[in-house]
Amino acid sequence: MKLWIPFLFSLVLGLPIFANQEDNRLYLKPKTIVGVGEVRLSDFTNWKGNWNPIVYQNVKAPILIKPEDLSGLLQNLYRKEMGTNVSFSVMGKDGILLPKTSVLSKKELELSLWKDLNTSTDHPLGEFGETFRISSEKETFPIISGTSTIWRYPGRSLHAGKRLFPLDFYFEGKLVHSESVPFLIEEKKKAYFTKREIPSKTILTDDDVELRYFFSSDSFREYTEENPVGKTALNGFLPDTAIEKKQVRTLHTIERGQEVELVYTAGNLLLKIKTRALNSGNRGEEISLLNLASQKTIKARVQNEGVCLLEEK
């Protein structure tokens, strides 16, 4: 039995050292991202063999690889390392190695995007921070060395909010890779702010509000840019709060469409009639009322909430 051991060991040594047995076929990947250092055969192909040579090292720029060129390169490497000739069949279309060995800082990302946005929107954005502020959500971003980059922006105007901007990488005039980078866009807005705490149902005065400019990433809220003095706060406000349009409204002592009690006095006679307001009015103002019984229009003066006084002519 011991006589078989050397024989079996010699058979093992004589077997091909490749997982891809027989004709040593392998498939070239269309695109491979690599870093600093060694690039082995299995990094950019489907090769699973035990022999896994270093094909490239410290790649500084994209490398285009043709299947026939890789086949010849592998034969030379194998001959140099093993001393024998082996044929390799490389399948697939041309491949490319893309070295991510350079890094952009947060500030560099922001300035790069700002520069491209200034040329891609309908209206120039001006100086950084004049009408918009952009902030990268990544502190650093690795890029492909040896390529040119262009930010792809599909819109013609810029809006506040969180946005993904695709960054395209070009090599020899062709698009070779694209990645999306998240940014926060803030737009300069103006609105009236409260100067103090405002209780609900307060009629605003000049002492309550002031106009301010601020940056916001919220593109959905509609802030009031018109002076709200004289309007009523529908809800309470804390100090230094931007006022939205829906939060204030001009309220009257009597609102149009409201049911109103019309009061008429003549000597000791007091008459009360149910009417409906045909227009809004505040205390002391004359408004039109509809007599619900006779359907006739009456002019009366607003006296209190829900009450009008019919004056003697």
Image: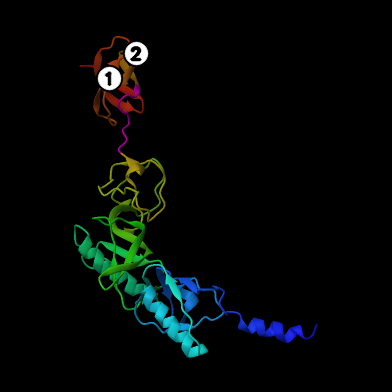
Against 297, is 88 above or below?
below
Q: How far across and how far down the image is residue 212, in percent?
A: 29, 57
Q: How far across and how far down the image is residue 109, in percent?
A: 33, 71
- Disc 2 crowd rating (10 Å Cα; few below 14, some 14-19, many 20+) is few
Against 163, is 146 above or below?
below
**Depth check: 206 or 265 in front?**
206
Q: Find out whether residue 304 is within the magenta segment.
A: no
54 left or right, relative to 264: right
Check disc 2 and report the residue beneath it: 271
One can see residue 283 in this view: yes
**Depth check: 211 or 153 in front?**
153
In three-dimensional space, the C-alpha distance between marks 2 and 1, rounded to whole angstroms, equals 15 Å
Q: In what element is the residue under mark 2?
A: strand
Residue 143 placement: quadrant: bottom left
Q: Which residues are magenta?
A: 250-259
Q: In what element is the residue under mark 1?
A: strand
Q: Residue at x 37, y 56 (%)?
A: 240
Q: Earlier in the sequence, mark 2 or mark 1?
A: 2
Q: How many marks?
A: 2
Q: Residue furthest top?
A: 294
Residue 233 placement: quadrant: top left
Q: Amino acid at mark 1?
A: Leu
Check disc 1 and report the residue beneath it: 289
One can see residue 97 in this view: no
Q: How far across and how far down the image is residue 128, in percent?
A: 26, 68
Quarter of the image where the C terminus is located: top left
Residue 177 placement: quadrant: bottom left
Q: Residue at x 44, y 73 (%)?
A: 89
